[in-house]
Image: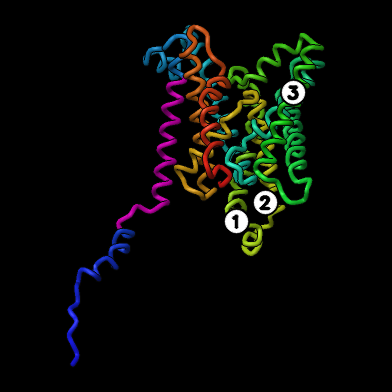
Amino acid sequence: MVQATAVNPARHQPASLPYDKERRAIPRTTLRTASLLALALGLFAAVALSLWVGSSTSTPAELGHALFAPDGSASDIAIREIRWPRTVTALAAGAALGMAGTLIQGHTRNPIAEPGLLGINQGAALAIVAVAVFTGPLAPWTQAVLALGGALLAALVVFGIGRVDGRGSSPITLVLVGAAVTALCAAVVSAIVLLSEAALETLRFWQVGSVVQGYDSFLALWPLLVLGSVLALANARGLNALTLGEDSARSLGVTAARARTLGLAAIVALSGLAVTLAGPIAFLGLLVPHVARRIFGADYRWVIPGSAACGALLLCLADVIGRVLARPGELPVGVVVALIGAPFFIYVARRRKAVSV
């Protein structure tokens, strides 16, 4: 005798729920686009705040007058000739450092890697300071060439020593070698200062980090920012493939050596530009990639432009904070970023799975 089995409709209902939930969910691309738009609005607000706030706060009427109908008044000069140049410098240097930090963390698979920790910033600064001692003030393109050369040499030393055993660069090895190169460059700069008092002012700017003096360099070097950004975006596909492993990347038509060479070129161009504009600002390249990955996920086609926006926003706001905290003087932007980035570095370094990116 065959017994009839009662069918419980409720048991079959959950099978359709995932499809319904997926159909109702907001597409990932839409969320990422909305996030980029939100960052763009944040950048607009940060620029307005940077133009508004200085050693003294301008009124909205003074801000509008300086932007649309300047007549050479004191407020017009403060906004157009002091605050606007440093705002543009902060945006450019922050975007460059954000993208450079993302590329370094992606290629090294190291969440605590960034241009400052791997000696790249200090290598660029050493090249500029060493030559400026003997030649005096340098032209923007001369500074850029020296910064690129110093950054490239430091990067080759760090990655070369890290791979000397032929087994690849481990995250810990890269950080240790980068710390050693950074200390060596700082020691050489200190020795130069002891031999030449004329280097003291140059050292103060390049060792702390500031966006006060970089606008003229930006006007001459903005093509370098465009070039570095294009190289970084072109490297996104290779980075996405390399996250799957070199064998999988090869099966997708991506050559690891070619992708890393492209990434290194972008890192050197962006880091060299940032050092030329604002000096060796540490921790920004560490903090920004984590924020961008939290917002945009793991796809570097979105993370790289997101890092540019986040870096520009963070450095611009850090500059405003430095003006407010030490009125009527100001804190250099490098100090403000360090106050924010150092605790974050400790947090990331102490995480159980800090070596996975």
Q: Is residue 112 left or right of residue 35?
A: right
User: How is colour applied across the structure in the image?
Assistant: rainbow
What residue sits 62% from the left and 48% below the top? 235
- Give the secondary structure at mark 2: helix
Question: Nearest the camera: 315 or 188?
Answer: 188
- Give the secondary structure at mark 1: helix
The magenta stretch is 24-50
Q: Reading the chain from its start, which is encountered first: label 3 or label 2?
A: 3
Disc 3 residue type (three-letter): Ile
Task: Give the quarter of the figure containing the N terminus.
Answer: bottom left
Residue to which mark 1 is pinned: 241
Q: Position of residue 96 (x, y in %)?
A: 59, 34
Question: Nearest the camera: 142 or 29?
Answer: 29
Q: Position of residue 141 (x, y in %)?
A: 72, 27
Residue 170 in view, yes or no: yes
- Give the secondary structure at mark 3: helix
Q: Residues within 10 Å of mark 1 (few under 14, many from 20)?
A: many
Question: Nearest the camera: 175 or 303?
Answer: 175
Disc 1 residue type (three-letter): Ala
Residues tagged 2 and 1 counted as in contact (Cβ below 8 A): yes
Residue to which mark 3 is pinned: 128
Residue to which mark 2 is pinned: 259
